Image (spheres, helix red, strand yellow):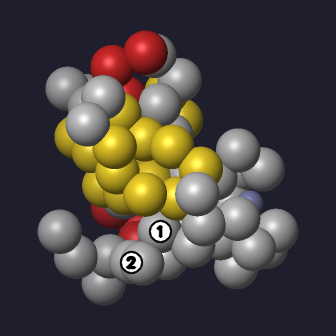
Amino acid sequence: MSFANNKKLPSVAVVTKNVSDHALVAGNPATQIGWVCACGEKLADDLSCSYCNKAYRKAKFGFTVC
Ligand SMILES: [Zn+2]
């Protein structure tokens, strides 16, 4: 998914359901476009937060803080 044209990017919502903790989704129907930290910052590709320096990893059942 490209962010080249931000003007057409739909409003972004953060969902905190059990099945997808920290998933960053956009659009309707929602499509996951990334992950967000507990602090609300979007995580980098390596799942680290540039704001609070938390690091995450994908676990067997979801998503956990290292
Ligand atoms: Zn953070």
Q: Nearer the viewer, residue 3 or 66?
A: 66
Q: Quadrant of residue 27?
A: top left
Residue, disc 2: 45
Residue, disc 1: 47
Q: Residue 6: horizontal and vertical position, in percent?
A: 41, 72
Are there few (<14), some (14-19), or many (20+) residues within 10 Å of tag 2? few
Specify the quarter for ligand 1: bottom right
Q: Does residue 1 appear left or right of residue 63 in this picture?
A: left
Identify whether 42 is placed above or below 50. above
Q: Which residue is drawn at 22% across and 76% down?
A: 2
Res. 22 visible in picture: yes
Amino acid type at mark 1: Leu
Q: Which residue is drawn at 47% across and 31% down?
A: 21
Task: State how many labels appear.
Answer: 2
Are there few (<14), some (14-19), or many (20+) residues within 10 Å of tag 1? some
Q: Residue furthest bottom?
A: 4
Quadrant in the picture for the C terminus: bottom right
Q: Residue 45: horizontal and vertical position, in percent?
A: 39, 77
Q: Which of 59 and 38 is in front in this view?
A: 59
Q: Residue 23: horizontal and vertical position, in percent?
A: 42, 41
Q: Nearer the viewer, residue 20 or 61?
A: 61
